Structure formats: C-alpha cells, structure tokens
Image (spheres, rainbow, N blue to C red):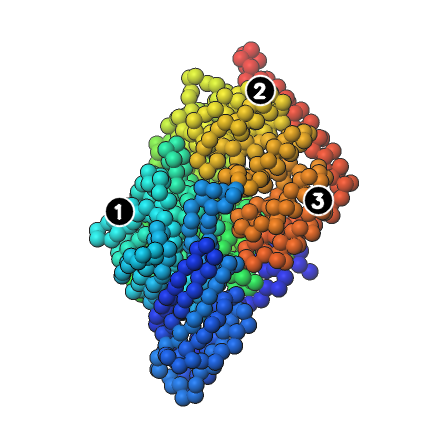
Amino acid sequence: MDVSPYKSFALPGSKPQYNPDKPGLVHHIALTLTLDIAAERLTGRCTIHLTCLVDGLLTLTLDAVALMIKAVYLGCEPLSFQYNGNQIQLQLPSGITAGQTLEIGIDYQVEKPQRGIYFIKPDEHYPHKPVQVWTQGEDEDSRFWFPCFDYPGQLATSEIRITIPKPYRAISNGVLVEEQELESYRIFHWRQEQVHPTYLMTLAVGEFTQIDDGWDGIATPYYVTPGREEEAQRTLGKTPRMVAFFSEAFGVRYPFPRYAQVCVDDFIFGGMENTSCTLLTDRCLLDEIAGKEYRWSEDLVSHELIHQWFGDLVVIKHWSHAWIKEGAASYFEVLWREHEYGAEDGDYFRYQDTQSYFSEDSDRYRRPIVTNIYKEAIELYDRHLYQKGATVYHMLRYYLGEKLFFASIKTFLEDNRHQTVETIDLLRAIEKTTGRNFLPLFEQYVFKGGHPDFKVGYAWDEMGNYAQVTVEQTQTVNDLTVLFDLKVPIVFGYADHGSQTFLLHLHQKTQTFCFPLTKKPLYFAFDPSYHILKTVELEVAVEDLKAQLRHDPTVMGRVMAIQALAKKANPNVVESLREILQDGSVFWGVRSEVAAALGKAKREYAFSALRQMLISVEHPIESLNVLKAVINALGEDPSLATVEAVLPYLKHESYFVSGAAARTLGKTKHSEAFRPLRKTLRRRDSCNETVRIAVLDGLANFKDTSEVRDLLIEQTELGVPQPLRLGAIRALGRWGEGQKDRKVLARLAEIAKESFFLTRLATISALEALKSPEALALLQEIAHNDPDGRVERVALEAIENLRAAVSQGEEIKKLRETLEDVQKTNQELKGRLEVLEAKTTHSPTLAQ
C-alpha cells in the first residue's frame, strides 16, 4: 500500500512520452509570411527541405494546430494531404529513395491563434498599450503558427521573410539579410545559419527602438518600446560583459554572430532563449530606484544568455532531459553572482534556490528530474527542473574541483556543438575529461526523486580528547528508509582561525565517527559550504552553535547554526542572534536569516530585538535587504508596538522596504494600520506596481470589512495596470477565504472568462484561496477548457487541494482553532518562564 507523504507528479491521463519516428532529416525551414495585425492574421508558405532516411517513404506527418491549410506541394507539384486540425499527413508519390532531398511547400493561414503567436494591441481599457506581435515556441507551440516537426530532436537552419505594415519592424533569429521599404509596407528577411529546433524559431513585430551594443565583434542590440531606452540601458547594459565572462568561463566563445534581446508587452514568461534572439518580458525593465535593489532582472538576463550555450548550441533531444539546459542556466546564474557580487552572494543565492526546490518537494510533489511521464512537456518546467537541476551542477563542481569541472563543461559543449543530447552525454563528457563516473550520483539525484535528510549529532569528549559525530539518514519512502551513498565534508574550526576538514562516507542509516584531535574545536560544521543537496537537523550544544554562528567563515555554515539555534530559542540565544543582526560587517544574507529566525521564535523578547533594530540610532541598518527581512519577520507579531515601529517605513524610498512594511502592517490587522495602507494604495507609484501589490496583500487580511472587498474588486477591473490587477485578483481570493461572499465569487467567475495566460493563473490562485466548494465548478471549467497545459495543470492541482481543504469540515476547523489558542497561550507562558529563568541565572546578587 502506497503511504508516501508526497503527491504524485503524474496527472490522470499522463503517459510515457517519446519523440516520434524520424522519416527524414530536416535541413532548412523557410517561412514567407504576410502579417495582418488588425485582423490578427498570418498568411504565407512554410517550405521544408528534408532528406529521406529510407526507401519507399509514402507519408509524412507534420504538426499543425488550428491552421487553415490551403495547399501542399512537393517541389512545384501539388500533393494530396489529410488534415485533422492537429496534424497534416502528406501523401508522397512512389519511388522516393533514401538520401533523396524533398522540398515540401505548405500554403497556410492562421487567424486569432490560441497559442504560439500573440497579438498585442491597445483597446478601450488599455489605450496606451503598444502594437506588438510575438511568438513563444517552447515547449510545443510553434505548431500553432507554422507547420513543422515540432519536437526538439530535429535541427535545421531557418529563415523568415515577412511583410508587415509600416511603421513596424520585424526581429527574428540570426542576421538581417535584407530590409525593403514599400509604400505602406516593409519587408524583413532574417536568416539563421546555425541549426536549431523549431521551438527556438522566433518573430517579434512592433515599433521598437534599437539600442546598439556589443562585444568583440558580436552585436548585442536591445529592442524596447520607444521611451524606455534609459530603462533598457540600466537593465540590459551588462550583457556585453556577461558574453565575455561566460565565453571565458565555459571555454567556448559565444556561438552565434549576434545576440539580440527584445522586451515585449504581456509576455507570458520571464524570458525565452530563442537562438541569438531572446524575448524578455517588459516587466524586467527597471527604473532608477528598482535598479538599485532588484537583481531579478539581472539574473533573468544572465539566465537567458547562458541558454545560448546550454539549450541552443547544445540542444536537448527530448523534453525529459530539459534539466541539462534549465539546470545549467539556473546554476550559472550563481557563477555570475559570484563574479559580480562576491562568493558570499553567490552561495546565498544558491541556498535560496535549494529552499525553493524543498518547498515544491514537500508541498507540491516529488518526482525524478528526468521523467517522460506527463501530459504536456511544459509540466516539467518546475523547481525540480530548474533549482534541483542547478544543485546537481554544483555537486559536480564540488566533487570535481574548479579545473576539472569547467574542463568537463568545455568538453560537453564542444563535443556536442549543434547536436542533440541526453543526460548520458553529460556523463560521457565528464568521464572523457576526468575519468570519473558520476552515474551513481545521477541515479540518486536525477533519475530518482528526493534527497537525503540528515540528523547530525556532535559532542566533544574531554576525557578521551576526541570529537564524536553521529549521522543518521531519516528520509523514508513508503515507510522504508532509502539510503543515499555520499561523501560529505565536515569541518572542525579552531580559535586561531585554523581548521581541519574530514570527508565522511555516508551510506548507512546510522554511522558514528570519532576524531582524536589535539585540542577541542571552537566549532563543528557539517558540510558548511552546503555543497551537497540535503536537509540537516543539527543536534549540537547551544554553546557550540553560538561559536559556529560567530566564527564559521562560510555563509551556509552560519545559516545552519542560525536555524538550529532558532529551535532552541530563549533570551540568551536571542541575545546572540541579536548581536549578529546588529553587526554591519556580517554578510547581509546571514543577518536576514537571523531576522527570519527571530520572527519564527514568536517570543516577545525576540520581537523586541527586531523592533529595536528599526528604531536604533546606534546600530543603523545599512542593507535594504536586512531592513526588509526585519520588517518581514515582524509580521509574526500583530501588536500595536509592531505597527508603531513599522509604520514609518511604509513611506520608505525603497520599493522592497515599503512593500515589506505594507505586508507586515496588514498582518497585524490593526485599525491603526488600515488608513495608512489605504492612503498608500492611492498615492504610491513604483516600478511594476510593487508597492501597491504589497498594499493589497496587506489589506486582504482585513476580512471584517466590506470596504476592503470593494476596494479589491475595484482593482481587478480592466484598465488597472496589469501587474496591479493580477495582484488584486490573488488578494481578492485571500480576502474571501471563509467569507462565503457572493460578490467575490461572482467577480472571480467574470474574470475566469478572460483568456490571457497570466490572468488565468491569478484567477486559479484566487479560487483555490477561497477554500469554498462553490469555487470547484469554476476551476473544473478552466481545467477542461484552457488550451495551455500549464494552466490546466495548475487548475487540476488547485482542484485537488481545494477538495482536500473542503473535506476537513467545520469540526476539524474548530478543533484547529482551539489548538491554535492553546499553543498561543503556551508560547506566552513559556516566553515569560524563559525570561524569569534568564534573570535568575544571570542575577549579579545571586551569583555572590
């Protein structure tokens, strides 16, 4: 009987997915197109040059969804075909031989497409929206705008020749071969000389300003809506340095003659690494204030650039191996962080990625990184693929060392240049370069789900002068312990700043190690640099943890000490944490983790330490990140004291800080916070509406007033800036939880009729948050009718979660509320007792 606590990744209807048979090799794809923007229509011919692999080929099947197929030709001769709305089956003449090259021409038209190509235009609600047309091919959406073999196993050169109305311009892969000016039209001809899969073919049409930049003969232009040039320079201006950096790091020069970045409106993802021509959401463009504190945009720019090597130069053969490119792009973001902001920043960024994976693994589902069981390939694009995949690359870097790791990366890229790869090809490149076989590691982390959970004990034996370390693997699957076989470093640090490192071979459920040492270590650390993907529960004395917090030179060693100390919170522990929080010389990530730990302690003396940081004159908080973390942590304390301490920061210049203040003030549910939040919503502008979205999140906590409901509904109206509107939809769902408010459900039902991808996702989130049986019908309708696989999946998961929540019933809800009241009372009593004990222990009078 399966009693696994982890939900299944595979949805009902999932099945093993494979690439189709390959009847021939595609060499070249040519699109000759005419674009009618007003009618949302694309008309033209797709020409495919293909070499047959076998004699007597009688049929060819191409992917083509919801296209109007007008005619099909073999050379100049018409071909018979059958079309079912999803695929075209071509009837070839007899006598076709292996090695023969065929030229297939398909005349077609697409109007108001469902996916693949998107028409963006101003309307009565958004009259200032630019006119744009752009494509998005990954995973299998190119078939929605031209007929093709739409899977990554076929690579070909390509060209697009398109006629568009003036004053617009067209941007695509490769280099611009020709641009013609006609009376009212323009013709652009782009050609991509290096082979790539169909999902990486792209087209962007609009009124763009071109900003020229470059590195060592490689053009790196940026294209943005007129008026956003300054934001483009601020956001994208590091691109030439990134191209130089990754060319050197990978040992392979940037592989294409050009690297363009086009920022488009209403893009459904963050970015897409089309070969030599990345499309980015215009939400990545930052104003001056955001440019000082946001690094998301810089991470996005580096991520999509890295794909030009991992994904475009070397192409995955099947979607199940997409971690090779997505894990690499996610991990080498860390490499840029290290280069640009230092090793500590890179380590902490990597740690945050692992926490993102852990969250999905525990709360959503557990799956192998490599799996071919799904309904649509887009389902694979999750935190297992990106964040866990990134940690596998880091473990390779750790086990191989810098020199051999990057030598292996170079081998992998050079040996598979302009070819398709599977996971085994990465293993082969490593073995070829280093002789090392990493299949055992991949068997544990890539081809199976999960990670080790370690419980680690440490103690010093004064009599024997030795350190004892006990490590237990606690992870289970179906009540059975599944053991990992790993080599994990431990460190003993000393007062003279020296240290000793030992490598533990962990392969049993419980293992104990003894280390005779010349003197007692100042601190002990278990994999302090966090090289191995795992969870750790430390069973270490408080004084030893304090020593590690103060003296461990690694960011992650100190973070693990903080987390262990937080579970032992008392006034003395909090005082040690407070000292670190106030120390401006300590890396901001460590101080931020201290703030979070103090908030989770949920003790008045911990909250007092946090509030003191906000009003202290002697110890100003220099880092905006730390300030934000302190304010976020105070969200655990819904007291008037928190309101008074946080309220001034609602007007802070920083969007991060102001937004954190808004969310924390909302969590207090205090009447003194309501009016300032409402005023901030009306008056505060910010990049991408960051602050107003945070204000709506805060206001959603005020469930006892219909004024908030009406205000949230107002912000969901068409015409409200899109980022703010999406935030309002989600906040409305949170406000409506447990309210049984007909107006909320009616408004969400109306929004659910809209077709925009991001609006659909926000609506699903809001409906799930309602925790109402009446939301199930709407979610089921979305899951059944939406053409996008990612929307369908999110809706199905929301249905499952909602059913589970509803089935708990009112009795369980009342029991939970009673339990929470008891726990709160116990925490308050425990906090008072700890304060009393601390005073007694450290009283100077009693000590005499």
Q: Residue at x 71, y 38 (%)?
A: 741
Q: Answer left or right for 395 relative to 174.
A: right
Is residue 755 or residue 597 the one in the foreground?
Answer: 755
The residue beneath circle 3 is 772
Picture coordinates of residue 777 (x, y %)?
69, 52
Picture coordinates of residue 652 (x, y %)?
45, 25
Is residue 536 or residue 522 the one in the foreground?
Answer: 536
Picture coordinates of residue 691 (x, y %)?
49, 32
Q: Answer left or right for 348 relative to 811.
A: left
In what element is the residue under mark 1? Answer: loop
Q: On screen, 202 above or below 659?
A: below
Q: Residue at x 68, y 43 (%)?
A: 746
| Earlier residue among tags 3 and 1 | 1
Is residue 791 or residue 814 the one in the foreground?
Answer: 791
In what element is the residue under mark 2? Answer: helix
Asked where in the image residue 94 lies, by quadrant, the reply is bottom left
Asked where in the image residue 197 lies, by quadrant, the reply is bottom left
Asked where in the image residue 76 lies, by quadrant, the reply is bottom left
Give the residue furthest to the right.
811
The residue beneath circle 2 is 641
Marks 1 and 2, how far apart at CA: 52 Å
Q: Amino acid at mark 3?
A: Ser
Marks 3 and 1, how far apart at CA: 53 Å
Q: Residue at x 43, y 26 (%)?
A: 653
